[in-house]
Amino acid sequence: MVNQESLKAIRRDLHRIPELGFQELKTQRYLLDYIRNLPQENITISTWRTGIFVFVNGEKGSKTIGYRTDIDGLPLQEETGLPFSSEHEGRMHACGHDFHMTIALGALSKLAEQPADHNVVFLFQPAEEGPGGAEPMLQSETMKAWWPDVIFAHHIAPELPVGTITSKPGLLFANTSELFIDFEGTGGHAAYPHRTKDMVVAASSFIVQLQQIVARRVDPLDSAVISVGKMESGTVQNIIAQKARVEGTIRTLSPASMSIVKEEIEKLARGCEISNDCSITIDYGANYHQVTNDEGLVASFKEVVEQCGYTYEEAPMAMTGEDFGYMAKEIPGFMFWLGVDSQAGLHQSKLDPKEDSLPIAVDVVESFIRTLT
């Protein structure tokens, strides 16, 4: 029976075992054990790497609705002090994927017992936080066999109160790209800088110049962000560094701006190599396509939220990245934000979403699936 207490128990079980992308073996096993205990007459299960597809036959089966949930955690040490804190050192469900999975299991449970008119395929997708599971999952044979006509997903929103749900037609999330830059010069004694090629200086200058790209190369009516979150260089205070590494992220509201930003980064790198007599290599890591919501689906979803008695609000665009964008690019779809009222935000070690939001989300997801024409 799906109720608040059963949902809380599932969420806490999953919260204890966060795993990184394509390493979600315990998580997959937990999900499969749960799904195999549901009534099996109307469902078919297929695994893909550490993810899972579950196909639920509809009463009429004229259309297939896709619902995607992500299942991986983050490389972060939990500091909530909760009795069900992460049992995996340096790993935490700090982006709410434990909530996402629980809500998917709740909706799946109800549909397995009483199917909707349409078929439904649940996608338990690994590696959303990296290196990206949505794009390769789309290319799998199971996905091609169970290709949905529409697809949707959601994300928790710590800043929103419980009972509030937001979305918007059109662009919701940005295009994103990881950014890893390695510098190599010549190290040496700090007393003889003229005999070295100092990579602390090279990398520091490069970071400052990165900010000029957005200010002077991106259309002011568009938006872009280049943020450097990490820099490593050197070993001790009296040795000039031979190497440096800069790690960051790029966010843009259009694919065209992403191309411009990367082109300008590469130009800066070539100039930096000449001026600092060093070599620079760039790796863009994981790249996520923007999430563009289907206008008609969002309008229908808004009606369902309000009919269920919850508050619907228009969401602002965000520079958040989500690899669900690859799915929404190929299939008409949308994402929505679920209010969970946590003082700590996403990707923070003290994130503590309110579990009262779990049955609300299950209600909305199930109702939307049942009323979609």
Image (spheres, rainbow, N blue to C red):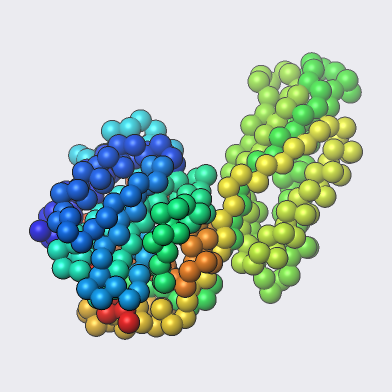
Residue situated in front as seen by the camera: 90 or 17: 17
Q: Residue at x 31, y 79 (%)?
A: 372
Q: Is residue 90 above or below residue 44?
A: above
* Quarter in which the C terminus is drawn: bottom left
Residue 68 place in picture, x, y as percent? 37, 59
Left or right side of 224 for 48:
left
Residue 289 place in picture, x, y as percent? 57, 60
Left or right side of 287 for 300:
left
Residue situated in front as seen by the camera: 228 or 123: 123
Q: Residue at x 33, y 62 (%)?
A: 121
Residue situated in front as seen by the camera: 26 or 268: 26
Q: Is residue 150 above or below residue 86?
A: below
Q: Is residue 269 above or below residue 62?
A: above
Residue 21 place in picture, x, y as percent? 44, 41
Q: Residue at x 67, y 71 (%)?
A: 222
In the image as oriented, which residue stretches furthest toward the left?
A: 1
Q: Residue at x 54, y 67 (%)?
A: 329
Count the numbered circles shown: 0
* Figure quadrant of residue 6: bottom left
Residue 340 visible in the picture: yes
Residue 116 visible in the picture: no
* Quarter in which the N terminus is drawn: bottom left
Q: In this view, does 317 lie above or below 286?
A: below
* Figure quadrant of residue 123: bottom left
Left or right side of 27 for 315:
right
Left or right side of 329 for 353:
left
Residue 286 place in picture, x, y as percent? 58, 47
